[in-house]
Image (cartoon, rainbow, N blue to C red):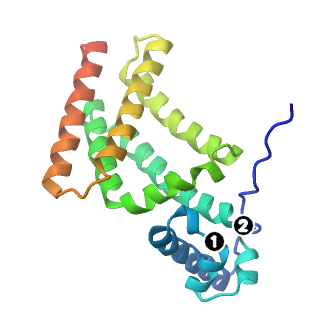
Amino acid sequence: MTDRPTARISSRKQPKQARSTELVATILEAAVQVLVTEGATRFTTARVAEKAGVSVGSLYQYFPNKAAILFRLQSDEWRQTIDQWKTILGDTTKPALERLRRLVHAFIRSECDEAAIRAALDDAAPLYRDAPEAREARAEGDRAIAAFMRETLPDATDKARELAGDLICTTLSAVGKSFSEAPRTATEIEDCAEAMADMFCAYLKTLNRDL
């Protein structure tokens, strides 16, 4: 049985001149607007080109299909999230649980601030979720969490650290997605994040009494 083919999602070429970089930025900005207003099912390269004020041919110079545009938006979002996680969790000048608390607050705020685009990208996920680039993005996030768990739970087994990391990431992602589906006030966001952080910190303290 042959593997199901995956649509090409890599950009055709990377912009090298300032004008080309601006064009790609314009296309991506237009793509966000189309995605939020039209949804994933009505998202097309033609609509993006029209919104950006460029020809479809110009768009195709950088993105071979709509999956490539959507994946670029998703990869940018992943990159921002991963960089944020690595920066917060890697700041060893602060205690581990303080870093975890900061991470939870930053993540929940981000989920609520960007709820519309995240929901639309989730709808479009079947177009690229099986691609190698998608797997690598997820793997990089997993490595950041694994490094934090090795530091936080030095005496735990690899299996216990992996379980702790999975539970925290899965819970944070699921609650963030569900919580951000409705409009939230700043107070509601703060209260939710604080409660989640309390729960995670209490859990890690049961695994390492020295925290």
Q: Which is more toward the observer, 14 or 182?
A: 182
Task: Decide: is 83 above or below 21.
Answer: above
**Which quadrant of the view contains residue 165?**
top left
Residue 96 point in image, percent of width and height: 30, 31
Image quarter (top left, top right, bottom left or bottom right) of the C terminus = top left
Given the current orientation, which residue lies at the most extreme bottom position? 53
Residue at x-position 42% and y-position 30%: 148
Q: Are the residues tagged 1 and 2 within 8 Å (C-beta)? A: no
Which disc number belongs to residue 44? 1
Image quarter (top left, top right, bottom left or bottom right) of the N terminus = top right
Is residue 63 toward the left or the right of residue 105 in the image? right
Mark 1 vs 2, N-terminal side:
1
Q: Amino acid at mark 1?
A: Thr
Residue at x-position 76% and y-position 56%: 8
Is residue 75 toward the left or the right of residue 209 in the image? right
- Whether residue 6 is visible here, answered yes or no, is yes
How packed is label 2: few (under 14 Cα within 10 Å), some, or many (20 or more)?
Answer: some
Which disc number belongs to residue 114? none
Given the current orientation, which residue lies at the most extreme right position? 1
**Which quadrant of the view contains residue 153?**
top left
Residue at x-position 72% and y-position 66%: 65
How packed is label 1: few (under 14 Cα within 10 Å), some, or many (20 or more)?
Answer: some
Task: Decide: is 207 above or below 105.
Answer: above
Residue at x-position 43% and y-position 14%: 160
- Whether residue 211 is visible here, answered yes or no, is no
Q: Which is more toward the observer, 14 or 179?
A: 179
**Which quadrant of the view contains residue 206?**
top left
* Mark 2 residue element: loop
Q: Nearer the viewer, mark 1 or mark 2?
A: 1
Q: Amino acid at mark 2?
A: Asn
In the picture of the structure, the residue carrying the numbered disc 2 is 65
